[in-house]
Amino acid sequence: MRSEFSYICPKSLKEALEILTDYGKRARVIAGGTDLMTEIREGKLEAELLVDITRVPELRFIREEGNQTSLGPLTTHAELVSSMPIMRGAPVLGRAAHSVGSVQIRNIGTIGGNIVNASPAADTTPALVVLGAQVVLERRGGERTLPITDLYLAPYRTVIKPQELVTKITFDKVSNGWSSSFIKLARRKALAIARMNVAVLAKMEGKRAKEVRISVGSSTPTPCRMEKAEALLKGTVPSAAIIEEASQAVAQEMVERSGVRSSTGYKRPAVQGLVKRALQEVLAINQ
Ligand SMILES: Cc1cc2nc3c(=O)[nH]c(=O)nc-3n(C[C@H](O)[C@H](O)[C@H](O)COP(=O)(O)OP(=O)(O)OC[C@H]3O[C@@H](n4cnc5c(N)ncnc54)[C@H](O)[C@@H]3O)c2cc1C
């Protein structure tokens, strides 16, 4: 714990990566600061240098490249919401970003910070999981690309090394024939970190569900897809009964992955209800 630290604001990616290599664990990246400021205020920052990456131009972009969309980590939640490529090619992410905090938080908070902070309640993560997002991590002299689900070790812990920066997030566009839903159950309407959220993506072929992807936030130790429920739905002509069964399967998988806790009594029916609503929306089943 330290109350004093230095601050540096690199102007290029190369410079930022040099600094991170030189300082290693003694440096900490700051983007919008909406998560990190809490740590600083509580006197929990252990680094001696804050590396402000907000002036690194290479990290701020939204690009469409063929069938893929790429985002720079400095893309704010507000920029996601107002981006045509996102609202057209990945509306589930746009809805997730729209649900984040307040206008002020959405204007400053970035998708990179949301991913790296690794809160189980992060809103963009379930959306990125169902999109099958890949995350590019760069360090001086090299880079690696990981599926977003491979980033996480535990709540608030990732595999990202102190020398590495998230430099790009990519996913395939899901416009033609895909539909999606993002629903958040929060304590209060504004400024509430999600108690629970669900992202669902589905591709229909005629009346059949060709593929369904489900991810639930704040419910499993690390972000993941709910594969048992997805398998139940795949290839079916969705009905109220199958949606009920799939929602129960998600709740069951949550308990299997997290174990029974004091919150299970509340979370089990809550997750079941949320998933049911999201599936009804995506598969156009009215009950
Ligand atoms: C009042 C309030 C309400 C909120 N509501 C919500 C909500 O509803 N939903 C939600 O999901 N979140 C919410 N948050 C959390 C926060 O706003 C988001 O997680 C935000 O996206 C974090 O982005 P940031 O740029 O501010 O990250 P920062 O605070 O700057 O950084 C967060 C972490 O990421 C690291 N980091 C940032 N960028 C990079 C990078 N490119 N490479 C490597 N490491 C990096 C930092 O070192 C730090 O560890 C809320 C926060 C507050 C204060």
Image (cartoon, rainbow, N blue to C red):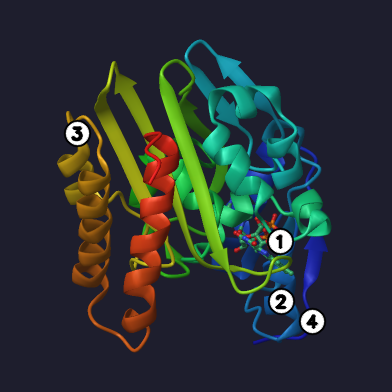
Queried on whether the Cβ of the residue with tag 1 lies below 8 angstroms from ligand 1, the answer reads yes
Q: Nearer the viewer, mark 1 or mark 3?
A: 3
Q: Residues under labels 2 and 1: Cα distance?
A: 15 Å
Q: Pick the quarter of the image with the N terminus.
A: bottom right
Image quadrant in which you'd find residue 232:
top left
Q: As shown in the figure, which amino acid type bears the numbered disc 3?
A: Lys
The residue to which callout 2 is attached is: 38
Earlier in the chain: of badge 1 and badge 4, it is: 4
Q: Nearer the viewer, mark 2 or mark 1?
A: 1
Q: Point out residue 108 in the picture as x, y percentages from the top left corner.
A: 79, 53
Q: Secondary structure at mark 3?
A: loop
**Tag of residue 4:** 4
Q: As shown in the figure, which amino acid type bears the numbered disc 1?
A: Gly
At label 1, counting other C-alpha atoms closer than 10 Å, the crowd grade (few under 14, some 14-19, many 20 or more) is: some
Q: Residue at x 49, y 30 (%)?
A: 170
Along the horizontal axis of the image, is 260 left or right of 180?
left
Q: Residue at x 66, y 37 (%)?
A: 14
At label 3, counting other C-alpha atoms closer than 10 Å, the crowd grade (few under 14, some 14-19, many 20 or more) is: some
